Image (spheres, rainbow, N blue to C red):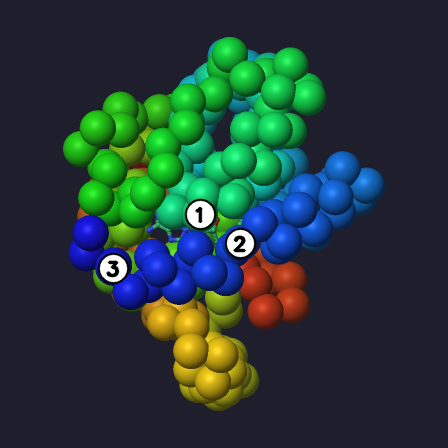
Amino acid sequence: MKCCSQCDGIERLFNESTARKELEDYRQKGPSKTTRILIDTLKANGIQNMSLIDIGGGVGAIQHELLQAGAQNATNVDASTAYITAARKEAERLGQIDRVTYHHGNFVALAPEIEPADIVTLDRVICCYPDMEALVGLSSSRARQFYGVVFPRDVWWMKLARPVLNGLFWIQRNPFRFFVHPTVAIESVISANGLKRYFHRNSGVWQVIVYARIS
Ligand SMILES: C[S@@+](CC[C@H](N)C(=O)[O-])C[C@H]1O[C@@H](n2cnc3c(N)ncnc32)[C@H](O)[C@@H]1O
């Protein structure tokens, strides 16, 4: 697997106790602020009977909310064993389990076996992966209609925060590293795949962007 040490780091960072806590939070409070912005923007387009690929979906907030709002089915691809287990547990509780397909692993490696879908989402995932061109290129090429992403703003203070955060991972001996890929580079990969930005909002350290396929 191309991201070998990063994927080991992901398993350690997004572990059982993080997944348990995030699932509890989701059950009590619903999706986090930026996830909610992404979900509401997609819902405003009308997502009835659409298919979804949610990459790095965590405990599955986007999948659960869009399926509840009328999406037909979802494919969940996640490199964390604990998150896949938590997302599945919640889908079972919500009666959605027959509409979700689960793939555990690195999306970049699994991409050849993932069919395109109407909507593709990566919520706070691009910052977890070193090879942005591969992750964004392969995922945006699978979006038939909408591509929704949440990733860090590439402002100077985020660029300063990055080595500090990565230093903490280094001290913890976790090979996981955090990335602030330049927005302009991300968007050039997305537009090369025929998608155009139609929604953008900054919220704290994150930016939420939705693209639509140009017909
Ligand atoms: C910061 S968490 C975000 C979880 C959720 N989307 C949210 O916003 O709460 C990052 C997620 O991306 C997953 N991830 C990171 N890189 C990935 C990759 N290359 N393929 C699949 N999943 C990946 C991690 O396992 C984790 O579930």
Mark 1 vs mark 2, CA separation in Å:
7 Å
The image shows residue 14 at horizontal and vertical percentages of: 52, 55
Task: Mark 1 or mark 2: name the one nearer the start of the chain.
Answer: 2
Question: Between residues 23 and 215, which one lies in front from this camera angle?
Answer: 23
Mark 1 vs mark 3, CA separation in Å:
13 Å
Residue drawn at x 58%, y 50% as measured from the top left: 16
Three-letter code, disc 3: Cys
Q: Say how many tags the image has.
A: 3
Mark 1, residue position: 80
The image shows residue 168 at horizontal and vertical percentages of: 51, 82
Residue extending furthest right? 28
The answer to whether the residue bearing label 1 lies less than 8 angstroms from the nearest atom of ligand 1 is: yes
Task: Mark 2 or mark 3: name the one nearer the start of the chain.
Answer: 3
Number of the label disc, if any, that sits on residue 4: 3
Q: Residues within 10 Å of mark 3 (few under 14, many from 20)?
A: few
Q: Are marks 1 and 2 in contact (CB under 8 Å)?
A: yes
Number of the label disc, if any, that sits on residue 15: 2
Residue drawn at x 24%, y 38% as measured from the top left: 110
Mark 2 vs mark 3, CA separation in Å:
17 Å
Three-letter code, disc 2: Asn
